[in-house]
Image: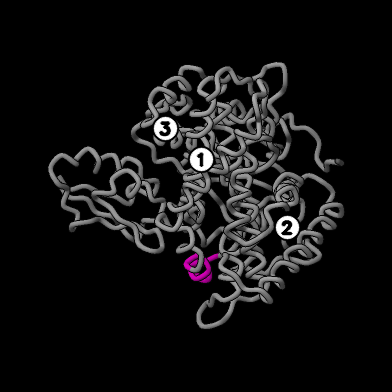
Amino acid sequence: MTNLYGPVSDWQNDFDHADPSYNENIHEIWNDLLENKKCPVAHTERYGGTWLPLTHEYVHEIAYDTEHFTSRSVVVSRLKPSQMEIPPPPAPIGNAPPISSDPPFHHEARRLLLPAFAPKKIEPWEEEVRQICNELIDNMGDAEFVDAAIQYAQHIPVMVIARMLGLPLEDSDKFRGWVHLVLESVNEEPEKRRKKFEEFEAYLSYHVQDHIENPRDDLITYLLNAEIMGNKLMPEHVRGTIVLLLIAGIDTTWSGIGSSLWHLATNSVDRRRLVENPGLRPTAVEEFLRAYAPVTMARLVKEDYDFHGCPMKAEDWVLLPFPAANRDPSVFEEADKVIIDREENRHAAFGLGIHRCVGSNLARLEMNVAIDVFLERFPDFELNTSEEVKWSVGQVRGPRSLPVRVLARR
Amino acid sequence: MRVRVDTAKCQGHNRCYALAPELFDVDDYGNAHELNDGVVPAGLEDKARLALANCPEYAISIEE
């Protein structure tokens, strides 16, 4: 892998969220930056100019401000839309509606998806998720050393979203490859990435065509039949929404499950409390979502704009680190502490404003069941310190490898 | 005590319905509204406060 940008030494003026040390040391980096209270917004010339606001107030403000910031591209990449050979569809639609859409189109594109992910549509999936989790644990046999990310967390959301969309479950390695391509390889040479994007496109075209010829009861067929303002969706809208559901439906929840298990593997007191008191688990999952929120979103600046003294230029990237907002001491008491029975918890792990994660109900279900089953089957476990925990790179943070030693199993 | 959901602020995070289903319901789009015109039955005041304290969009208010 040839990275375009080298290691970071100045996080205030030359940060890089895709430098591996960012996700590895994220809380120390934010704390250091926030001590410089003059402007709690870091900046870098990398990726053609990128800003990183760190307070809840600023993240909240940008998330709500669709006048000055566009969602046309939500993954910070080497190339801006205007520099791409084949630029994404312009705002308000974007390349993966509705996450890439702006109002008023956004409202219509989102309204199309919301019913499929509403709480009462998601609740019936619980048994299936539980079965998937138990099978994954069964597959570990009686191994003392397992990898809770590779053998457990990474499989759960893939299997569910592939079933919902109507894509072959055996392609899950491909899906994870494309997740890596879209989210983790932003620092690689654009030419190399383009080839892989073409393979992804070809795969989608094949399966969309297959669904046109063989309609069935799944989300791809639903999208093909859906209408916006009396018109069928454009083919690129259908493909873009599949990309969104596939990418956003996989590594986010995988990361959320992985970070929660990392916490439990490294905090025996919390683990014991949750083993003894299953009723506390949903509250604890909300706290894991706050403290280890996986997703940082991004916006593009529409026109030159002075944001609290930061001279933002048109088409600058702005990262929206909801995970940093979740650790802002002016909003959360003892923000740096993980308190598994925290009662007041207005965390923003699923975003704020009109782009609230459309799959949040599914993600919560998967996280709750995954933690529940893991604790039931492995009531005692710890980090296997002879191997390394490997964290993801880029805008979604979670352990990609989580070596664990199982001390008790049921 | 009465609870209110500001439907202009609600983005469907679904915290109130998860924490206090006796007081809130959600529609087919996942957006919340209060049940029973917002009247909080005796004994459920803590649940109402819990829902308020967990809404990321500050969409819930309480009249004591």
Per the image, the residue denoted by label 3 is A281
Numbered badge on residue A153: none
Amino acid type, residue under disc 1 in the picture:
Met
Reading the image, the residue beneath label 2 is A80
Q: Secondary structure at mark 2?
A: loop
Upstream in sequence: badge 3 or badge 1: 3
Is residue A330 visible to us here? no
How many tags in the picture?
A: 3
Residue sitting at the far left: B42
Point 51% across, 47% down: residue: A363
In this picture, residue B39 sits left or right of residue A231:
left
**x and y percent of residue A282 in the render?**
41, 36
Residue A91, x across and y down, in percent? 61, 68
Locate the N terminus of chain A by quadrant.
Answer: top right
Magenta segment's dominant SS is helix
Q: Which range is magenta?
A: A102-111
* Picture residue at 86% right of the left edge, 52% below the top: A192
Q: Amino acid at mark 2?
A: Lys
Q: Earlier in the sequence, mark 3 or mark 2?
A: 2
Q: Residue at x 25, y 40 (%)?
A: B47
